[in-house]
Image: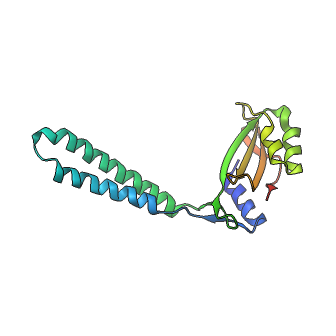
Amino acid sequence: MNKIKFYEALYTSCSYIVARRKSIVLPILIIVAGIVLPLASTMLLKGSEFDNINSAVILLGIALAIGGAIWLLGRVNGKGEPFHTEKGKFLVTKTLSYDRSRRSEVLKAMGSGNLEALLAVPTCEVSALCLLLTMLDDKSFAAAQLFEYAELEYRELSRVTVIKG
């Protein structure tokens, strides 16, 4: 099950779904907070009774700065997330697992374009069948592809299908 191939097929089949990077403002703010927090604590809390608090705040600041930097690198270097240009929202991707006996139900719901029926099919913990589903939060757009786990790999059982759009 390859999400990158799924996304590429989705981008080519729907002109209004594009790869877009999320904003870098929040990671930058976290980095700034990670830098400012230790500086402010050393200026405000002076004296030997505050040494442990200063050390903890410095450690927290370093952790925030490193975490923010990693997050920023991911946002800058990533390929982007599926974005619906007409609605102006990012798509949410889920993986749903089904028992093999549910194959016809899932394929029928995908073929009919009925998202509610697809989400109503009972899931299970065993990932014999996996549905890669990406949709908007309000369920006004959805696309899916069904995979079957066989011989130590996921094999495609369907094409990328726009269920609702």
The residue under the point 36% across, 57% down is: 31
8 and 151: which is toward the camera: 8
How many numbered discs? 0
Q: Is residue 96 visible?
A: yes
The residue under the point 75% across, 44% down is: 131
* Quadrant occupied by the C terminus: bottom right
126 and 83: which is toward the camera: 83
Measured as percent of width and height from the top left, residue 150 is found at 77, 38
The relative height of residue 28 versus residue 124 in the rendered view (above or below) is below
Measured as percent of width and height from the top left, residue 25 is found at 45, 63
The relative height of residue 38 versus residue 55 in the rendered view (above or below) is below
Q: Is residue 150 visible?
A: no
The residue under the point 10% across, 44% down is: 47
Measured as percent of width and height from the top left, residue 114 is found at 84, 48
Quarter residue 55 falls in = top left
45 and 129: which is toward the camera: 45
Quarter residue 60 falls in = top left
